Amino acid sequence: LRAVGTAPRLAPLPRIPTPNDATLDAYRTYLTRERDLAPATARFYLQVAQAVLPGDGDLTRLTAHTVTRRILDLSHRYSVAFTKYWVTAVRVLLRYLFAHGKIATDLIGAIPAVAGWRLFGATGSGDVFSLDAKTGCAQWSFATGQLVRSVSVGTLSGGKAAVFFADNRGFATALDAETGALLWSTGVEDHPLAKVTAAPTFFEDRVIGFWCPNCPAESRPDPEAFRAKLP
């Protein structure tokens, strides 16, 4: 009846202030003006932010543990596809918070990669892990002894799924996603300041990454020389 105008429209409910209002308002401006996201996408990203941010507005309580736990809880209730979409929104939020100085620690590494009903991620102590997304039980763990910020997952041409990551020594590594066994590990650069600051991307049997941000241009790796070092 309201749709055809025969009944009065309900007055909108008053907005109840929350401790996160200032953070969400600034994030909304970032999404719509700087990122230029579609309104529906921006609304979804804001809904995810509301679910992830601590209810009392204290961003110091946003830790790697709470981020991983929230994603694991979500994966118990929703499909893999929706969980991946949700994880993308969390990644955008955490990058925004860190880049704008709202959190002191880059928490991107706390976001697990989602593949099938498994979650893959890295801890701050250098362990790469696999969890069952339904139960939260650990499937395997691989100790690197180095800082690993995040991981990515891809399927090789032979059908084997692999987990890819890189570390602060400038090494790129691949593990068997099923067992956690080492497939290969390759140094991408010999410069003492070389490091990889993000998870490599896998595309058509190629691993693509960025490394050595502190190295002078003349000492950065030659692509042909690096290709020759790959297994």
Image: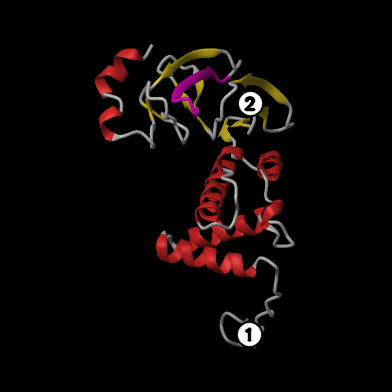
Quarter of the picture holding the N terminus: bottom right
Q: Is residue 162 magenta?
A: no
Q: Is residue 176 magenta?
A: yes
* Picture coordinates of residue 185, whole percent (x, y): 47, 16
Which amino acid type is shown beneath numbered disc 2? Phe
What segment is highlighted magenta in the picture? 167-177
Q: Indicate the colouring scheme.
A: secondary structure
> Which residue is at the front of the view, 80 or 1?
80
Horizontal side of residue 108 vs 215, given as left or right: right
Disc 1, SS: loop
Residue 201 falls in image quadrant: top left
Badge 1 crowding class, 10 Å Cα cut-off, few under 14, some 14 to 19, many 20 or more, is few
Horizontal side of residue 192 vs 7, given as left or right: left
From what the image shows, is residue 194 above or below residue 38?
above
Q: Residue at x 34, y 13 (%)?
A: 229
Tag 1 residue: 9
Q: Residue at x 69, y 53 (%)?
A: 60
Q: Residue at x 55, y 55 (%)?
A: 97
Residue 156 falls in image quadrant: top left
Real-space CA distance between mark 2 and mark 1, rounded to the nearest whole angstrom: 53 Å
Which amino acid type is shown beneath numbered disc 1? Arg
Disc 2, SS: strand
Q: Earlier in the sequence, mark 2 or mark 1?
A: 1
Q: Which mark, residue 129? A: 2
